Amino acid sequence: MTITRRNEIIDEVTQGIYQDFPVLLEKFGERGVEKCREDNGHHLKHLETALFLGNPQSFIDYAHWLDGILTSRGMATEHLVDNFCRLQNAFTKHERANAPKYNEILESAIHSLKKGNDS
């Protein structure tokens, strides 16, 4: 994935989150927006690594680890799930070559996060 494409995806996802959830801006301010951008950069790196290694479980493990950190800081698992869904949509638009593979990994993580919250 090119740097330009990576930045387009991060921008689109971050802007969408804060447009649809203005309460997050009220709660976390501009620092929250920057952390969201950083987190999405990490999501992309972990997705690329999971794809390169052929190991989707590494991304699922990352998702659960991150969820623990985010929920301890006042976020909800639903916010992370929403973020991953937004990434799926962005990949479909901007990263067509690898979108099916990335989206499959994201879907596994989404399913695992939702399952983890049902228990």
Image (spheres, rainbow, N blue to C red):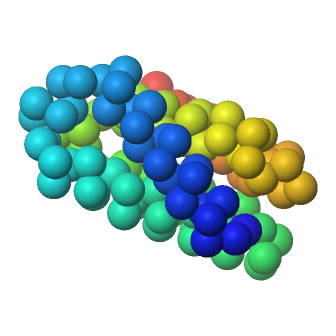
Measured along the vertical axis of the image, is residue 21 above or below residue 87? above
Q: Is residue 10 left or right of residue 32?
A: right
Kindly identify the residue that appears in the image at 10 percent across and 34 percent down: 27
Is residue 112 in view from this perspective?
Answer: no
User: Which residue is the extreme one toward the front?
Assistant: 4
| Quarter containing the N terminus | bottom right
When asked about the image quadrant of residue 117, the answer is top left
Horizontal and vertical percent position of residue 118: 46, 26
The residue closer to the viewer here, 116 or 36, is: 36
Measured along the vertical axis of the image, is residue 44 above or below residue 78? below
| Quarter containing the C terminus | top left
Measured along the vertical axis of the image, is residue 38 above or below residue 54? above
Horizontal and vertical percent position of residue 38: 37, 63
Q: Is residue 15 left or right of residue 56?
A: left
Horizontal and vertical percent position of residue 90: 65, 41
Kindly identify the residue that appears in the image at 77 percent across and 40 percent down: 92
Q: Is residue 21 left or right of residue 17?
A: left
When asked about the image quadrant of residue 75, the answer is top left
Horizontal and vertical percent position of residue 14: 41, 43
Kindly identify the residue that appears in the image at 30 percent across and 24 percent down: 21
Q: Is residue 65 left or right of residue 18?
A: right
The residue closer to the viewer here, 51 or 7, is: 7
Measured along the vertical axis of the image, is residue 31 above or below residue 49? above
